[in-house]
Image (tube, coloured by chain):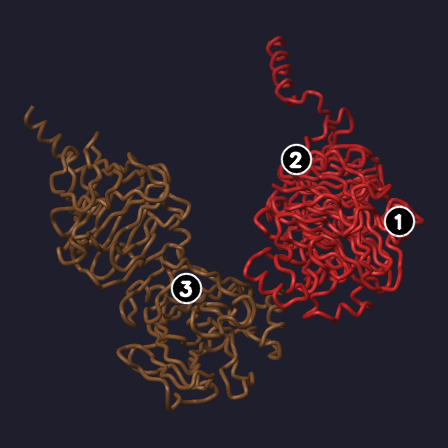
Chain colours: A red, B brown
Amino acid sequence: MKNIAFLLVFVVGMTQTTWAQKEKWVSLFDGKTLKGWKQLNGQAKYTVENGEIVGTTVANTPNSFLCTEQDYGDFIFEVDLKVDDAMNSGIQFRSLSKPDYQNGRVHGYQMEVDPTERAWSGGIYDEARRDWLYIPNINPEGKKAFKIGQWNHYRIEAIGNVLRTWINGIPVSHLIDDMTAKGFISLQVHAIYGSMKEGMKIRWKNIRIQTENLKPSPTDNCPVINLTLNTLSEQEKAQGVKLLFNGKDFTGWRAVHGTKMPEKHWAVVDGTINVSPSDGSETGNDIVTTEQYGAFELTFDFKLTEGANSGVKYFVNEEFDSGGKSGIGLEFQVLDDEKHPDAKMGAVGNRTLASLYDLIPSYKLDKRFQRKIGDWNQGRVVVYPNNMVQHWLNGFKVVEYERKSNIYNALVARSKYEKYKGFGAADKGNILLQDHGNNVSFKNIKIKELK
Amino acid sequence: MKNIAFLLVFVVGMTQTTWAQKEKWVSLFDGKTLKGWKQLNGQAKYTVENGEIVGTTVANTPNSFLCTEQDYGDFIFEVDLKVDDAMNSGIQFRSLSKPDYQNGRVHGYQMEVDPTERAWSGGIYDEARRDWLYIPNINPEGKKAFKIGQWNHYRIEAIGNVLRTWINGIPVSHLIDDMTAKGFISLQVHAIYGSMKEGMKIRWKNIRIQTENLKPSPTDNCPVINLTLNTLSEQEKAQGVKLLFNGKDFTGWRAVHGTKMPEKHWAVVDGTINVSPSDGSETGNDIVTTEQYGAFELTFDFKLTEGANSGVKYFVNEEFDSGGKSGIGLEFQVLDDEKHPDAKMGAVGNRTLASLYDLIPSYKLDKRFQRKIGDWNQGRVVVYPNNMVQHWLNGFKVVEYERKSNIYNALVARSKYEKYKGFGAADKGNILLQDHGNNVSFKNIKIKELK
């Protein structure tokens, strides 16, 4: 009997081992008590029921966090959670609470729980610090991962500066950021806001973590947001993303209608491309990529100064005679809408920030996602092989159109580009940064060609 | 033994009976010979192999038809067919061959076999007569029914003037036409054209027909094309289609900006609405529906005279001051593009036939589907509850846009409508027929509201 018992235990033990025999999961929840956790900030109720941690909302209290007593640097973390409808929540990781930072307010990375139509679950939010870092709108497949009203399986891999999330096995976020290397993990019960009510519940179970022998998941198609400076992460390289700006000099760039960089106005300062101010007019001093591009995803950060005007153009055709002014191509407008008069020109605001210049006005972002002058914005232009084009600003799609369609032709025919036959319609063109005589800066300029 | 044999035969006989015990199928193919069929027109090869009729293309011969020796009036017909790639074919029904009609050329209704990207299988074509009658573009689900390279199950119900087709159980066409009540059925081997070659094959089997106790399939969502005059078929009524023009008088219509019909210019002649010619200018004499419509499918037939100009408008808002001219709304342009100067005005042809007038030019149809002046055209305007709008002409979508979007606003802002705040943007509006001083005619004006 003893031999059989031993054999049984051995066999059962072997079956408990996963294929990756080296994975060493540690449970963070004993199923009965909150041992290993401590509550910070708000006074929401945390209890244990039926092998689950249950968080219940309480009125008149700020965000509550049930935090690991231990800090974690590099780890792989998993939890199953089930949340009442319309009840926002999140999983904090590498998070902090310091007396000298807003009186101990919990801050740091959060993997979002969003059981609403907005569907941002799995995105990465910087709680009480930089606001949204990875909005899942750029990953439509990821937005379908979370199932409202059901148990959802959450996974976070934080290894070095690579922060990745999955919901139910579907990748949602892939963020490269180096602000915080270590901190605690928390289960949030949000303060009551919007349509939330007192007594709403969220449940967590099967909470476990790996901290040794970490095997990162392989690279995949999840779009990358890289907040570090002018670098390509492993996943970006695997996806074919290239730097258009190397962070040091103007390799890959030259003056529009020229062969070398302009003498004046353009400089690299602290890893950013800087356009120095002149008289605010189109100088004809724009710079273009030496290469031409057809279908691509172009991303770039830009920073305005007060009243500034600039632009990022694509499908630039140097054969168009611009009379010594700016190179001619489709333009993602860069502008201080509030202070520059061009914002009110054109028609229905089609010269405002992120608009397809003088053609299609961008949809305006909620104030929360508009950046102050002097802060960095994230721009994105996607041109698909089927001629669909999108402009994105700070995580939101703000323009969409079909190049060369009947609608496109009608817009161009009544714009300032009317005289350029074939405007924006070639198979390829240069990318251009505009010198409109104002001080603006660019960094993290990257391109991925699409087939 | 005999009793057992009888019992066996009885049981087997019972199992052969379908649920609908009254369905009386008659086989048209004995599996071994072409008895009951005769070949007309071309010299393609028809043989019997392995229980299938096989048609093989032959060079330098016109369309070939293997025709039933018997004629059929009302029937339900089924066949399984498998066709080589890129080889066009079709099933003739209620078809004819007369010495005094193109020397015996087979003509009449055909259920299309189209194993190409165009995917018009199941549409109804009028062979050697009126050309295409039901193009499946209006039925996207139907276009997915045919499986290239596989056996496909074809079904035709021809009962009275209701002609319906299914492929693999999916409804493709629903045509109401009264031109021919009876004729033969044929299996076509097409003349070689396009990418077809000699020696290509099509196979047919399980060919059967019902002619008694016919039970038509129930009404469904398949779009109806009704070629009879100002009538609603059973399926149109079931789908909520209503007549805007009763074929007799102007019930439901009045002068724009008025309360009664205009005194002059509008008459009902032989079941058609006729606009009599004056001086070719906007008369301000348009007529509008007494009701207003928000989301709908509007269909109408129209006929031009040489050099004529008219229009069908929607979301007409009588509060806009048109200075005594045409009522103001979104317009499906009605125009003789060749002879009327307005075709060259506006921008990039956005005043041509079926265009969204002065906003978006329609895509131009292949000459085959353009009607001669004096022949009837089929117009269709669909406004979805989500604000997507489509213009269709003679079976093809030629304009598509999103009402009230940023692109729409940009187009309107640089059009003749710029001064009308909220142009085309209300929740509802009148439908309008324009008197632009030229002779045009309308019939079969129908509307179905969409939720």
If you read the primary sequence from the N terminus, does the residue marked by circle 1 or circle 2 appear first? 2
Residue at (40% x, 89% y) in the render: B260
Looking at the rendered structure, the secondary structure element under dot 3 is strand
Q: Chain of mark 3?
A: B
Q: Position of residue A121 (x, y in %)?
A: 67, 47
Q: Is B250 placed left or right of A174 in the picture?
A: left
Q: Chain of mark 1?
A: A
Please indicate, yes or no, whether residue A368 appears anywhere in the rendered image: yes
Query: Which one is closest to the eye, mark 2 or mark 3?
Result: 3
Amino acid type, residue under disc 3 in the picture: Leu
Q: Label 3 belongs to which residue? A: B393
Q: Is B124 placed left or right of B386 in the picture?
A: left
Amino acid type, residue under disc 1 in the picture: Ala
In the displayed structure, would residue A385 be above or below residue A217? below
In the displayed structure, would residue B145 be above or below residue A278? above
- Please tell me how crowded label 1 is: few (under 14), some (14-19), or many (20+) other residues with Cα within 10 Å: some
Q: Are marks 1 and 2 in contact (CB under 8 Å)?
A: no
Tell me the quarter of the picture where residue B228 sits: bottom left
Q: Label 1 belongs to which residue? A: A267
Q: Residue furthest left?
A: B2
Position of the N terminus of chain A by quadrant: top right
Q: Position of residue B431 (x, y in %)?
A: 45, 76
Circle count: 3
- Please tell me how crowded label 2 is: few (under 14), some (14-19), or many (20+) other residues with Cα within 10 Å: few
Position of the C terminus of chain A by quadrant: top right
In the displayed structure, would residue A313 be above or below residue B85? below
How far is disc 3 from disc 1 in space, using C-alphas? 56 Å
Q: Label 2 belongs to which residue? A: A220
Please indicate, yes or no, whether residue B219 appears anywhere in the rendered image: no
